Image (spheres, rainbow, N blue to C red):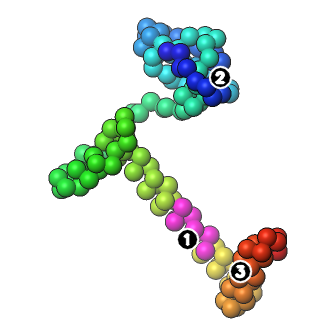
């Protein structure tokens, strides 16, 4: 599966999987990491970096199926990109929501830790001083200067 590309390419180290025909799947080494690849990948061939570096771990778990309003399903199908499946869209959506919720959780944890640190030290900042400092940094940035 030689990928013609006008962009950057990479040369791969390819290792066959025991008991699997090489046209079905191989392990490819690039940047010190082995990646499972399907299709025909041959040692020494050049491949598009975007395809060669995409990490595709084997999927061994599943999400529960869910029933939705037909209008929601149709709306999801209407926004699919070319070549994108509804399953990959749902997976990408779940992944994005997990990352968003992890970020929210981390933000709250940092805020609570900051509150506890201030309570322990007895040192607090006045909200008006904080906002004034932020406005000063924003004005400097807009003027092309350094923020501090």
**Viewer-proximal residue, 47 or 121?**
47
Percent position of residue 69, x then y? 18, 56
Distance Cα–Cα, label 3 vs label 2: 45 Å
Please report the residue visible at 42 percent of the width from the left and 14 percent of the height from the top: 24
**Residue 125 in sight:** no
Question: Viewer-nearest of labels 1 and 3?
Answer: 3
Bounds of the magenta segment: 103-111
Secondary structure, mark 3, is helix
- The reply to whether dot 3 and dot 2 touch (C-beta < 8 Å) is no
Sequence-first tag of 1 and 2: 2
Q: Position of residue 43 (x, y in %)?
A: 61, 10
Q: How many residues crowd around disc 3 within 10 Å: few (fewer than 14), some, or many (20 or more)?
A: some
Reading the image, the residue beneath label 2 is: 10
10 Å crowding of disc 2: few (<14), some (14-19), many (20+): some
| Above or below, 144 relative to 5 | below
Q: Is residue 138 left or right of residue 93?
A: right
Q: Image point 73% across, 74% down: which residue?
A: 142
Residue 32 visible, this orientation: yes
Q: Position of residue 144 (x, y in %)?
A: 79, 70
Ranked by sequence position, the earlier of labels 1 and 3 is 1
Say which residue label 3 marks: 134
Residue 101, position as x, y percentages in the image? 47, 61
Residue located beneath label 1 in the image: 108
């Amino acid at each position: 599966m030689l990928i013609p590309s006008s962009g950057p390419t990479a040369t791969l180290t390819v290792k066959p999987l025991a008991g699997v025909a090489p046209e079905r799947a191989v392990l490819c080494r690039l940047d010190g990491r082995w990646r499972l690849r399907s299709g025909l990948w041959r040692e020494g061939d050049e491949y598009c970096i975007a395809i060669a570096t995409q990490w595709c771990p084997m999927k061994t778990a599943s999400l529960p199926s869910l029933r939705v309003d037909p209008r929601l399903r149709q709306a999801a199908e209407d926004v699919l990109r070319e070549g994108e499946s509804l399953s990959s869209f749902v997976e990408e959506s779940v992944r994005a929501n997990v990352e968003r919720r992890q970020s929210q959780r981390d933000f709250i944890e940092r805020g609570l830790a900051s509150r506890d640190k201030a309570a322990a030290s007895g040192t607090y900042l006045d909200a008006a001083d904080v906002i004034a400092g932020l406005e000063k940094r924003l004005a400097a940035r807009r003027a092309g200067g350094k923020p501090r």
